[in-house]
Image: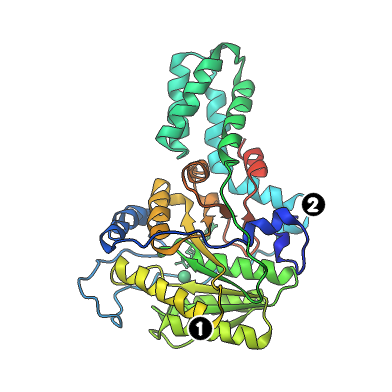
């Protein structure tokens, strides 16, 4: 079963490898480079409007001043009445449903390319190139794929044939080896969750907590996004839903202190897993990165080696912007893994291909809906099968 690592003493090496890894070594980033995050974030905002209204960046860097308007509604969605995840194959079904928009581009639209044609010609390859770019596989990757298809064109006899070849191409790109090192299991295992505002950090933490609980782990959540009271409230709802402990301080309190206290509490209470929620936006990107680094330092002061993972959450609907965000956060924070959310809300599912083929950071989780069981361990084989 995927996510077997959550089980205590789970012996399955493959499953464990997803989560138990050391931080990759990285370099400190000059502040001016972090400023470039502004571009990524601004461009990403149209897709996030419902959850995180845009607001002007202020020149002020006073750490206590709140500049962020609270999102319209951060209340986690009510649980679905009859989750079908219990059924056999429910997991794959959710993945398939989640990827339906992208699948339409890659299957129905490819079928249409063959209307009135029996052979692959240049015009068809051009149209295919457009489809792949629409799915956000990335321009260079798309061009490479299409070039290889061109060579195989005389042997391609119809849409099914073309899809099979395309599937192989994508599978090869998804399986690119990423260097992952292991760490001995720690108790508690501490995961710090970071990412820009609205990408789905809090939701992903709720889902991760529920999975860990279901696998018999004791979980504690740290409300280290102290920027807005609403954020703490939203996390509390998720904690309750997942039956996890939560450590929270007052709004605008020091996030590093919350994180420190949470690890202390987890040690005292014998918890297995600590999930640290963080803010996605402060007054400047430099402030944000500095704050995240400070949280990290304070956690490691309480527990050497922690945080054991730094999980960056990215929003699939932002397409290529997700890639820029990953690069910028990684320069400052040594990301150990990625979670890609909202694949259900976009036809840009090809971003998974772009991410796995161009970043040297493993994709650990994908989000395919708002419900508590809509987070899945990323499995390249299943992903390709669900995509076509
Ligand atoms: P944060 O600001 O990074 O903590 O983001 P939130 O966790 O508050 O999520 C922002 C919005 O995205 C919420 O409305 C979530 O319900 C929604 N969301 C998160 N993950 C997913 C997902 O996988 N699919 C869909 N459709 N929505 C999601
Ligand atoms: Mg949040």
Crowding near pointer 1: few (<14 within 10 Å), some, many (20+)?
many
Does the closest atom of ligand 2 sit within 8 Å of the Cβ of label 1? no
Crowding near pointer 2: few (<14 within 10 Å), some, many (20+)?
few
Mark 1 vs mark 2: give the one in front.
Answer: 1
Can you see residue 142? Answer: yes
The image shows residue 60, relative to residue 99, as above or below, that is below
Q: Quadrant of the C terminus?
A: top right
Which residue corresponds to the image point at 54% horizontal and 26% vertical from the top-left?
Answer: 110
Q: Nearer the viewer, residue 195 or 136?
A: 195
> Residue 203, how many percent across, how many down?
54, 66
Which residue corresponds to the image point at 28% horizontal and 81% vertical from the top-left?
Answer: 65
Q: Nearer the viewer, residue 27 or 321?
A: 27
Which residue corresponds to the image point at 35% horizontal and 72% vertical from the top-left?
Answer: 290
Q: Quadrant of residue 12?
A: bottom right
Q: Give the residue at mark 1.
A: 260
Report how many numbered discs are placed on residues in the image. Answer: 2
Q: Is residue 148 left or right of residue 89?
A: left
Q: Earlier in the sequence, mark 1 or mark 2?
A: 2
The image shows residue 196, relative to residue 266, as above or below, that is above
Q: Which mark is residue 88?
A: 2
Q: Quadrant of the N terminus?
A: bottom right
Can you see residue 82? Answer: no
């Amino acid at each position: 079963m995927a996510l077997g690592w959550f089980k205590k003493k789970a012996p399955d090496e493959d499953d464990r490898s997803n989560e138990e890894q050391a931080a990759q070594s990285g370099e400190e980033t000059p502040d001016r480079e972090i400023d470039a995050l502004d571009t990524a974030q601004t461009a990403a905002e149209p897709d996030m409007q419902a959850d995180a209204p845009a607001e002007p960046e202020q020149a002020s860097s006073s750490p206590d001043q709140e500049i962020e308007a609270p999102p319209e509604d951060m209340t986690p969605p009510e649980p679905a009445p009859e989750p079908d995840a219990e059924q056999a194959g429910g997991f794959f079904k959710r993945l398939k449903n989640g990827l339906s928009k992208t699948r339409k581009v890659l299957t129905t639209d490819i079928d249409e390319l063959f209307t009135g044609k029996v052979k692959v010609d240049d015009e068809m390859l051009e149209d295919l190139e457009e489809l792949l770019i629409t799915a956000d596989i990335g321009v260079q990757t798309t061009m490479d794929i299409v070039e290889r298809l061109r060579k195989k064109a005389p042997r391609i006899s119809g849409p099914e044939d073309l899809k099979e070849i395309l599937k192989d191409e994508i599978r090869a790109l998804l399986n690119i080896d990423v260097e992952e090192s292991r760490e001995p299991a720690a108790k508690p295992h501490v995961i710090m969750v970071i990412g820009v505002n609205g990408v789905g950090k809090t939701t992903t933490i709720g889902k991760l907590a529920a999975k860990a609980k279901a696998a018999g782990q004791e979980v504690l959540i740290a409300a280290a996004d102290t920027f807005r009271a609403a954020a703490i409230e939203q996390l509390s709802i998720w904690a309750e839903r997942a039956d996890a402990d939560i450590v929270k301080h007052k709004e605008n309190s020091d996030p590093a202190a919350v994180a420190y206290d949470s690890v202390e509490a987890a040690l005292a209470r014998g918890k297995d897993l600590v999930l640290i929620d963080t803010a996605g936006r402060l007054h400047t990107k430099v402030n944000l990165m500095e704050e995240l680094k400070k949280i990290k330092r304070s956690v490691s002061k309480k527990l050497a080696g922690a945080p054991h993972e730094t999980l960056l959450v990215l929003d699939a609907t932002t397409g290529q912007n997700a890639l820029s965000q990953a690069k910028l956060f990684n320069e400052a924070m040594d990301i150990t893994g990625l979670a890609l959310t909202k694949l259900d809300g976009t036809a840009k599912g090809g971003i998974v291909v772009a991410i796995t083929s161009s970043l040297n950071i493993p994709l650990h989780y994908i989000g395919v809906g708002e419900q508590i069981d809509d987070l899945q361990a990323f499995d390249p084989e299943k992903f390709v099968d669900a995509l076509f």
